[in-house]
Amino acid sequence: LPAWLCLAALLLPLSLPAPGAASPCPRPCSCPRAGMLLCREPGTVGTLAPLFRSGSFTDVVIENQQALTTLTRADTRMLRDLRSLTISRSGLQHISADAFQDTPKLSYVNLSSNALHSLSWKTFQHLPLQELILVGNPFNCSCGLHWLQLWQNSSLAVVLGNQSLDCWEGSVLVPLGNQILHTCEPPSIRIEPSEVVLRQGDSVNLTCHISAEPLATAKWVVPDVGPEYPLQLSDHKIFLEISNVSSNLNHKDLTCQAENAAGLAEESVMLNITFPPVILLLQEAIPLHFWCIPFSVDGNPVPSIHWLFNGTALVEGLYIHTRIMEYEHNSTVLHGCLQLNHPTHVNNGNYTLLVRNPLGSAARSVPGRFMDNPFSFSPEEPIPVSLSPLGTRNSSLEVPVETIEEHTFGVSVAVALAVFACLSLSVMLILLNKCGRRSKFGINRSAVLAQEDDLAMSLHFMNLGSSPHSSAESKLEGLKSNFIENPQYFCNACVHHVQRRDIVLKWELGEGAFGKVFLAECYNLLPEHEKMLVAVKALKEVTESARLDFQREAELLTVLQHEHIVKFYGVCTEGEPLIMVFEYMKHGDLNRFLRSHGPDAKILEQGPGQPRGPLALGHMLHIATQIASGMVYLASLHFVHRDLATRNCLVGHDLVVKIGDFGMSRDIYSTDYYRVGGRTMLPIRWMPPESILYRKFTTESDIWSFGVVLWEIFTYGKQPWYQLSNTEAIECITQGRELERPRTCPSEVYAIMQSCWQREPQQRQPIKEIHSRLQALVKNPPVYLDILG
């Protein structure tokens, strides 16, 4: 192509107006800046509408236009963004009552030095006025200006400012504030009766008494009906009759409005309609952060709300309770839900909502199904045993009769079984005492730890649940490549066995890749407690490889004994599913705890309760020091966690924090993980560059994650790089960018974070030194001033 043609093609877009650009300024006016119209050349403007068709303006100044005599709604209908209007030193004589109907943002009006003889209060009725200038107009003293006198003597005087307004009485100019306007009185209203209480289906008769001079026009405004046709008054009152009143009008206002030249007045009476309760809505349970059975009910008096579960009264408590979500304005309608926190299969059933007030009651039922029974039998009920002969075909139709011979035979069998059990138990005890040579589960420990492996092991009771891999990949990657056995760790580690009959499930706490987690009561676990609350992890898979992984994990967990590692009590291997029993931490995971004690706690609040105060600097340092203590212990054993985050730490009584995760991260914190290759889920926002790029996990990669945990603590549980997508977060981390210093974080703590985020793993500060620095800060907290407050 010729060079000149290429140049023309490049310059052509520059010569065209940009999309959405303002239209040219109308002549003969000027536009000093965007959104402003200035017309000062005398005698050039006769009507306003043509000026405003060419663009949207926020500021309009028109002066010296004697031909401009009227201002109507048609002139301003295009100026929806108008905020400031000046028409002065012009011939303006009339402004219609609806002139500013389409300019809801207009706050400054200057109409000085025009030819206005009157001005209605209706013109400015709905405007958010901050300043109104009217000086220099030849107003006639009439009732139509009484509203200005009222403004001067009320809080609206600030809108008029200190301007001196005058009006002509005949040929005499008098101050408007001193003018006594006879036969000029704005309406006053009184409604009879002033209170209306009636039952649904009754009739109501209301009388609106109006006093006004000159005579006012009046109307009734009924909700959902609109205003009636205005009535000219002759006897200073109007009537309203409504037959067969519906409950839809309950708590609704019936309004009488009256207006004249002096002003507007209105008065309302609220209808209090009593009616029996009705259930407007009842739906099946929906999963939120909790399970919710939504409902909406109405009734006056406000009905009481009760629930039945499978026909029996439901006792509400901390974990199952009715929560009212919102009230409708001027209504008795209640919207809420029956909230169930972590329900299990024992909560499956039929839920009946009962509402009742003195006028009646209503009931409706809905099924609720939350999860399948994880056991082949109910752990809370005994296993039924039949004494009738098994070979009888019609035994189900006959009443079983236990004969003396059957009883004697049963006793004999029971005694024989008991003797056999005692012998078996003795043999097992002998074998258990030799667990140094052989594992608790009979696993042959022939593996020898190579010296170059540096005793590195994955802390897999964390990774199984919190990094939601697919089952196959998790076992392959976690248990085979990183789970290296060291005989010295296991020689004295005998896994404690818990009998299944001693475990009573309460409700589900969460679900991970390897199974579900329940809150349970456990009997005979510790000598000093008859029963205690525990967290139970039930294995989802029952394959041989899954069972082997389960056994290895149990033996590993038995080794870990530290005050800031969640305590492992033992296993239950009787039947299915296989179960691990852990210490229960009453306040749940640390991330949720931080959010519930942060500045956004009310927004994130999920249930009723007193508002919790924010965590102080000392509390945050105490939490961080405890996690560091647990990580020092793990590092001393050369364990690698691989998924250290606040979601994988638990909070107990007296702000005790321990490292541990039971698989709840998969559902609640799925956005914290990044799917790689369609299967593996990685917590990339907590991972150092070498782990992201090369899948290398070491004690130093845990130190990086600990720095991110510190950042989480001082941001009250915010997600790292929350403003970025996973891909953008990976790019920032691998390019060496750091998380910004949290607003509530002292510089001494941020320096510790930065020491954890050194790109070279060997340059990161050892976790033992980090723990010592945090201990020193706990003893002598730094002085920190939150300027932003």
Image: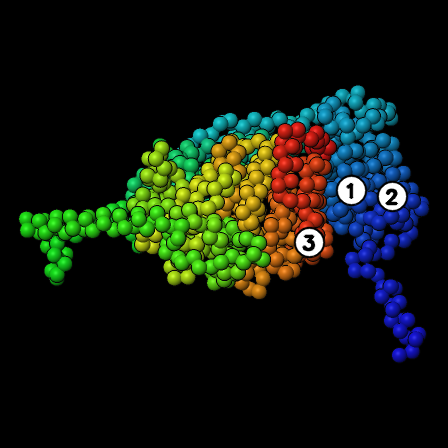
Of badges 1 and 2, the one in the foreground is 1
Name the residue type under label 1.
Arg
Left/right of residue 401 with respect to residue 182 in the rendered view: left
Q: Residue at x 73, y 28 (%)?
A: 156
Quadrant in which the N terminus is drawn: bottom right
Q: Give neighbour class at mark 3: few <14, some 14-19, many 20+ (Cα, 10 Å).
A: many
Report x, y in % for residue 761: 67, 52
Residue holding disc 2? 62
Name the residue type under label 2.
Ile
Among numbered discs 1 and 2, the one appearing first in the sequence? 2
In the rendered structure, find residue 733 and report the number of the disc placed on it.
3
Q: Is residue 364 visible?
A: no
Residue extending farthest to the left is 404
Report x, y in % for residue 59: 82, 44
Q: How is the image coloured?
A: rainbow
Q: Secondary structure at mark 3?
A: helix
